Amino acid sequence: MAFVPPRYLIPFHPKWIPHHFVDVMIIGGGIAGLRAAMAIDPSLTTLIVTKDRLQESNSSYAQGGIAGVLSPEDCFEDHVDDTLTAGAGLCDREVVEMVVREAPERIRELIAWGTTFDADDGELVLGREGGHSHHRVAHALGDATGKEIMRAMIKQAQDVLKAQIWQDTFTIDLLTHEGVCRGALVWNPRHGKTFVWAKQTILCTGGAGQVYRETTNPLVATGDGHAAAYRAGAELADMEFMQFHPTVLYIAGSSRSLITEAMRGEGALLVDCNGHRFMPEYDDRAELAPRDVVSQAIDQQITRTRHPCVYLDLSHLDAEWVRGRFPGITKRCREFGINLPEDRIPVRPGAHYMIGGVRVDEQGRTTLPGLWGAGEATSSGLHGANRLASNSLLEGLVYGARAGEGAAAAARLMPDSFTAVPLENPAVEPLSEWLDLQDVRNSLKSLMWRAAGVRRDGPELASALDSVEKWSRYALTQQLSDPRGWELQNMLTVAGVMLVAALRREESRGVHLRSDFPETNDRQWGQRLGVSRTS
């Protein structure tokens, strides 16, 4: 961005604010953050900070399941190949092989910690989703896998690890001194601001779907970790790649609800407003093509028919089986007068998973010493330009474990000389006029959906970036006093970085579809793009 955001969001001085000291600080309480905590030696002091309740994360809302080679008919090579194919040439093969080979062990850990996956006569029932060549997706409660996994992991963290957890606590900024991350400045309504000084910090803050008007993400997914890491000087990568889920329940005026890909894996068909099944015209894999292909096909079909959505048709499937396999979706649809499987489900794409994030190596190290990362807040090279379905919970487990182990090992090597660093950030003159945060937020979300949605082009991206930078020049230079303001500042920062990356990549690849550059150009763009605050 031409506009460089201030280093810190709020004024502070070490004499004004309480101090708290820990060996390892974990920011984020989703699957990656909790798995990181479980990898840390109990002899070390560990603090988990999460901006809402532990149950409120993208992990909890995951429906489809977690992928892994769990059947004798499947093999690691096929899971690797499926991931590489979906990633459209930008996956890091070594990372893919590492994650895929660790998957069975990580899933067995979940079972040992009390996760109850759907089973038949003691054998896991495995589903198939778009882009997968085998049935390899373990699921729970039919269509509430994330909820069940998080229930078991939260119980393990609270009852067994006795982890120190601060809920309803907003991480405002990462603290750095002499080029090293030293912890974070946090806030909660009971205690106000607190300096948390940590020997090592692990960033597991999840995604940024709330940057878009249409999204499956909960309200907490405002890209806070992405923005804080960017301000602190860490490198971000793959920020042009936001994955749009093809099938989001579309009811005008209601919040958007995810309709799991597993439905298509079990035989649901996509039809347009005329009842025409259109996916075979776009891809030989039809409804089981990867998410980027299906989302772009739906977007094109909506344009062709001039109808706001398409429909999932399950009418040819057994009614009792559908309701048993997808109880959560059946209940949600019934709230809107849609009776499954007789009635078709109106769907359209929505922002679902942020592929881009803080660049990490195979151990979860970021480019900022003292800072580690795992899960959706990071860019590991696993997903390339398009994430394979049900690889996200898997990535959170694998990288959570690795980041936790690495951070713990690094913390053990550091002396117990806990001291606060003399950091301070001066106050600035406030705006003389009132800033309507909600109006800017709504405008940003609509702008990003129009300009950086399923289909993009250079002039619209450039115009959107100009608007974001104009808003940023007055919204980011202010020192706001509550989470709504800080969220907006983070969303503006993340949106600006996403637009810059989308403008730079002058080709179409995976989830990044440029109508002005419709072809894939491996020679010029067969590489991942990085960006930092100083670049």
Image (spheres, rainbow, N blue to C red):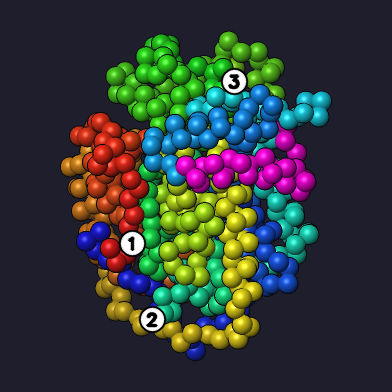
Q: Is residue 400 visible?
A: yes
Q: Please give the name of the residue rendered at 73% of the width and 68% of the height, measured from the top-left corner.
A: 42
Q: Please give the name of the residue rendered at 73% of the width and 42% of the height, measured from the top-left corner.
A: 108
Q: CA distance from mark 1 to mark 3?
A: 42 Å
Q: Nearer the viewer, residue 81 or 441?
A: 81
Main SS of the magenta part reads helix
Q: Please give the name of the residue rendered at 45% of the width and 51% of the height, measured from the top-left corner.
A: 379
Q: Which residue is mark 2?
A: 425
Dot 3 falls on a residue whose secondary structure is: loop
Q: Which residue is mark 3?
A: 266
State which region is magenta: 93-118
- Give coordinates of residue 177: x percent, y percent: 43, 79
Residue type (three-letter) at the residue carrying disc 3? Glu
* First in residue order: circle 1 vs circle 2: 2
Q: Please give the name of the residue rendered at 26% of the width and 73% of the height, measured from the top-left corner.
A: 432
Q: Which residue is mark 1?
A: 532
Q: Is residue 113 magenta?
A: yes
